[in-house]
Image: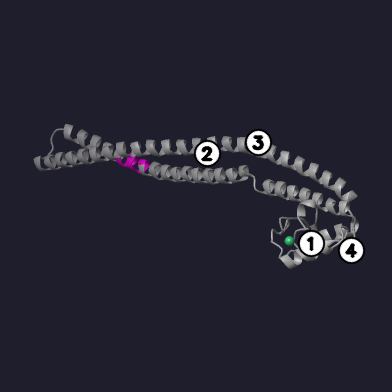
Amino acid sequence: MKVEAARQRIMLEVAEVDGDLARVRHQRANLPEDRELAEIAERISAARDDATRADIAAEDLDREAGRLDSEINGMRTREEHDSELLNRSGMAPKALSELQHELAGLQRRRSIAEDEMIDLMEQQEAVAAERDRAQATVTSLEEESQGVRARRDAAAADLDEKTADLQQRRGAIVADAPGELLAVYDRQISHGKPGAGLLRQRRCGACRMELDRGTLSQLATLDEDDVARCEECGALLIRTHESGL
Ligand SMILES: [Zn+2]
């Protein structure tokens, strides 16, 4: 295949703009803000779990407090009833002594229950504080996430614009490129291989393989407009005065 040397070199421009496009697409697909957002989402989910756990603990404590409260009220009622009986006159000494004994027991048990209640209320306060803290964390992380999302959208829009510019530039370059070389180039790309590279310092610019002396001397015998391919990667091997043949 023969193509004028200057027109062969257009393929290097195609390869360069495709390299730029690939870089921009890679950046677009790997935005650091996307990683940040994923990380914040994880932290939000952890804080929500903390809030849920605190809610469940609060419900348990409320139930326990309710039970304890009715127990205390029950004891108080019985104490009042016993006190009333004690204040009445005409009780047999044995019954009186039993009643006093029961009253003292009730008072002692109520005092223990009331201490438990104080404990419980402290736990309720602690759990409520924990829930507030977790909820505040969720709120602040959600705000942070909004800020990151705005940055992400701006970065994505910027890269989309760059992609559009590069695609436009590629269109203009390709319009000038020789069709038969473009066909080779596109076939290479569709197989996941580089399309074109500059031969420089004995290396293929596409795959970086160093060419052996035999191949180089063979390339040196080619006419300027002969189309060469890299034996290693199959890319169009473009020779310029830099190629050192
Ligand atoms: Zn190569």
Marks 4 and 1, how far apart in space? 16 Å
Residue at image coords 81%, 51% = 14
The stretch drawn in magenta includes residue 69: yes
Q: Residues within 10 Å of mark 2 (few under 14, many from 20)?
A: many
Q: Amino acid at mark 2?
A: Val
Residue at image coords 67%, 46% = 27
Q: Amino acid at mark 3?
A: Ala
The percent coordinates of residue 45 (x first, y second) are: 53, 46
Query: Circle 2 sits on which residue?
Result: 138
**Vertical placement of residue 229 versus 142, above or below:** below
Mark sitting earlier along the chain (3/1): 3
Query: Circle 1 sits on which residue?
Result: 188
Task: Determine the secondary structure under disc 1.
Answer: helix
Q: Amino acid at mark 4?
A: Met
| Mark seen at residue 1 | 4
Circle 3 or circle 1, nearest the eye: 1
The percent coordinates of residue 141 (x first, y second) are: 54, 38
The percent coordinates of residue 233 (x first, y second) are: 74, 63
Residues at marks 1 and 2 touching, judged by CB atoms closer than 8 Å = no
Q: Residues within 10 Å of mark 3 (few under 14, many from 20)?
A: few
Task: Determine the secondary structure under disc 2.
Answer: helix
